[in-house]
Amino acid sequence: MSRLVLSALAVTLVCAEAAHAAGQKPPNIVILYADDIGYGDLGCYGHPTIRTPQIDRMARDGMRFTQFYSASPVCSPSRAALLTGRLPIRTGINRVLNPRSLGGIQADEITIGDALKRKGYATLCIGKWHLGHLAPYRPTRHGFDHYYGLLYSNDMQPLSLYRDDEEVENPVHQATLTERYTEEALRFIKAHDRADSSPFFLYLAYTMPHVPLAASPRFAGRSRRGLYGDVVETIDWSVGQILALLRDRQLAGNTFVFFSSDNGPWLSRGLHGGSAGLLRQGKGSTWEGGVREPGIAWWPGKIAPAGVAIDLAATMDLFPTCLKLAGAEVPADRAIDGKDLLPLLLGRGKGQREVIFYYIDRDLTAIRRGPWKAHFITQIEFGDRVRDLHDPPLLFNLEQDPSEKYNLTAEHPEIVADLIKEAERHRSSVKPGKPQT
């Protein structure tokens, strides 16, 4: 057995033994997931005018990732990957679903909600679901006791707000959505803050800053970045409210919280879209700006403060991490692409992820191993679908050139050949799921 595997087992055993000795229940788990926030949209990631003091504090009190990836540059596939720990091509959710879609997340997929509910967790999904709007695909059929939110993106019609399976608002008043989501989250936490309450899993997927943007009078006009900044600062307020309640109710020491976003900024929306900072391109592209995201982990007393992780990590890694925290077995009957983050988060080891596979729909467009990234296909924005095929692939050293400016294919043909072989091995190992459209 490898030293890394032994280390991971030791972390899990230590956590379980310590909790048992202290009479503690398994940790609560909160995932906060924004929509279309770019790598450069938060203060702690370098934005000069968007003020995010609460998220910045979360980063100071926890661990901030600099090389954290979504599994897709668009909405539905990225959400499927987060909740199942599997590449979108495996689940069949390769494309963005819409109100005319007849498919969605399949009954045999295991979500974080499914796994934690089986371990006695109370589970709540709030916000944007986007994994199928028809009854068999809704959150309450996939591991969540309750749901409050929109079943797909806020630019799709007809748009209704649901509580469980009941439509409660149409048309939706979007300006106050983030505040109402936050109120639901706070009520849920308060209902489970007693010592005899079951542990809880809260998945809060914010509707914005996906366009159309809207902010309530309380937040409108506050940001020097304009309406987009108002929306991001509203999300920052929401994060602050949730973390403050966890601290006030003395739940912080037994609650793991993670903040990220589904894909990069929607650049073609101009000032209504965000920023990928120093990264190239945005949403719909597998240039770095389309898939590298903010990633912040918070767990006072467990995760050392002010940590900065340069290890490779991905939203899919939350699946095995959350299951191990809950004492649940990671499914052995299917391919799981996520890697356990606990050794890294708890300071007992390095990150376990060595490779990033970049997909658009069912196409493997790029691969990263260590610092090296090879592009086989590039495109900008997903609406135009203007693609360039690269033979030989483009090659970038992302640790020295995160903006992907300097193609090193000619200088390193041996690395290109090695990455091509890695991609071929991966393609041959993947069994695609039935496409859900």
Image: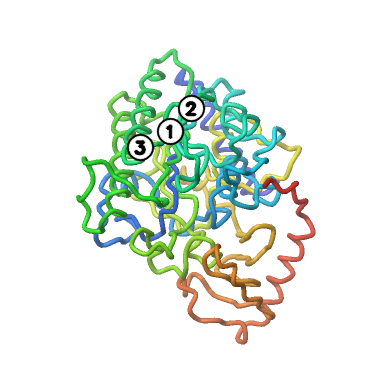
- How crowded pointer 2 is (Cα within 10 Å; few <14, some 14-19, many 20+) is rated as some
Residue under the point 49% across and 28% down: 147
Find disc 1 in the rendering and name its residue: 170
* Residue at the extreme bottom of the image, as rendered: 410
* Residue at the extreme top of the image, as rendered: 196
- How crowded pointer 3 is (Cα within 10 Å; few <14, some 14-19, many 20+) is rated as few
Residue under the point 62% across and 41% down: 84
- Label disc, if present, on residue 173 of the rendered structure: 3
Which quadrant would residue 378 be assigned to in this image? Answer: bottom right
Asked if residue 146 lies left or right of residue 275, the reply is: right
Badge 3 element: loop
CA distance for labels 2 and 1: 8 Å
CA distance for labels 1 and 3: 8 Å
Query: Which residue is nearer to you in this view: 156 or 78?
Result: 156
Which quadrant would residue 362 be assigned to in this image? Answer: bottom right
* Callout 2–callout 1 Cβ contact below 8 Å: yes
Badge 1 element: loop
- Hey, what amino acid is under mark 2? Glu
- Label disc, if present, on residue 167 of the rendered structure: 2
Q: Considering only order in the chain, which callout, 3 or 2, is on the residue closer to the N terminus?
A: 2
CA distance for labels 2 and 3: 13 Å
Badge 2 element: strand
* Callout 2–callout 3 Cβ contact below 8 Å: no
Q: Is residue 422 above or below residue 3?
A: below
Query: Which residue is nearer to you in this view: 93 or 331?
Result: 93
